[in-house]
Amino acid sequence: MKTRTKFLLLAVMIVTAFFSLHFFKPDNKNQEIHLTADDHQFAFVHSLEGTNADGDIQQNKDGDLQLDAELKRLFDYYLSAIGEKSLPEIQSQIEKILDQKLQAQAARQAKELLKRYIAFKQALVDLEKNASSTLSTNDNLLSAVNNKWQSMRQLRSQFFSEKEIQAMFGFDDAYDLDALSRLAISQDKTLTDAERRNKLQTLDKNMPADLKAAKDAPYQVIRLEDQAKKMRNEGASEDDIYRMRAAATSPEAANRLAQVDRDINDWNGRVSQYLEQRKQLTSSPTNASDNDNDNDKQRALQQLRNKYFTSQEQRRLAAYE
């Protein structure tokens, strides 16, 4: 179980790193916002060090905010720091970026949209809790998932106009609809295997290029990491690994994946040190009737956790203990 947990954690970190850079990497139509020199000297939170903020926010010729998915990407980039920074601190940082990147009128409009987006995300937490309990007790998976998605859409309409929804969430909706269509096909017991394959092939054929790229991302990352593992086993250097990744994706994506490697090595090193010292603490003799002694040991264990991990990181320790 612990091995599976570690594998899943590694996979999530790698896929997140690759997707955020490879599929939102700059081109002529979609340039990322690059952090200023001051931003690079002091990253907003540790987990964002060495990254560029997602979201090419712009205003139109009249000075009004341009509505598109870039706004959501920018908001989500900084909101990912929840746990390392408080929500008011994150909101203040986003508003500062909006003031830097937009003219006054567009910045005001973006800040108002940000407030609604945060309120929507908070309301979504409660919706997810209720939907999860319903999903776990519903025998019809397709019906449960579809109801959950429709509930999310209804909630979203309480915070955004139809124009804002299409601009900010249009791609997400297309992605979700494709997934629902595939789930419906997989659960349709009236279909033969051949009919099911044909329907899935039709979906693949009609899938927009950007949606196909997003769906292919995890598989490409897995292939890349299999290749990296093979190269390391054959004695390749980290520079060799970087060049392989850069050739297959982009220099930016290769840099991000290299940072993931460093983060994983750092995490594993801290976990190993912690577990070794924890073993020494827990294996020392304790008088079962001595509550003070037991309390001292618990305090010592907490001090040890605090030495190696942030409060957010400590939530992951149960998978290793």
Image: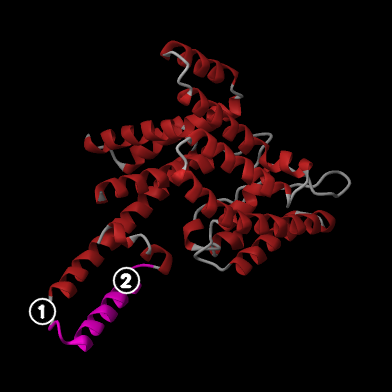
With respect to residue 76, does 147 lie above or below?
A: above
Which quarter of the rendering shows the C terminus? bottom left
- State the residue at coordinates (41%, 69%): 311
Q: Nearer the viewer, residue 264 or 296?
A: 296
Q: In whole angstroms, how far apart are the C-alphas of marks 1 and 2?
A: 21 Å
Please indicate, yes or no, whether residue 163 appears anywhere in the rendered image: yes
Which secondary structure, mark 2? helix
Q: Earlier in the sequence, mark 1 or mark 2?
A: 1
Percent position of residue 58, x then y: 75, 47
- State the residue at coordinates (36%, 65%): 314
Q: Is residue 146 left or right of residue 279?
A: right
Which label lies toward us, 1 or 2?
A: 1
- What residue is pinned by disc 1? 285
Q: Residues within 10 Å of mark 1 (few under 14, many from 20)?
A: few
Percent position of residue 315, x then y: 38, 63
Residue 281 lies in quadrant: bottom left
Which dot marks residue 305?
2
With respect to residue 94, does 279 lie above or below?
A: below
Kindly report the secondary structure that dominates the magenta region of the rendered protein. helix
Q: Nearer the viewer, residue 85 or 260?
A: 85
Which amino acid, mark 2?
Arg
> Does residue 293 belong to the magenta stretch?
yes
Q: Residues within 10 Å of mark 2 (few under 14, many from 20)?
A: many
The boundaries of the magenta stretch are 287-309
Which dot marks residue 193?
none
Q: Nearer the viewer, residue 145 or 91?
A: 145
Q: Is residue 302 left or right of residue 27?
A: left
Percent position of residue 230, x then y: 26, 33
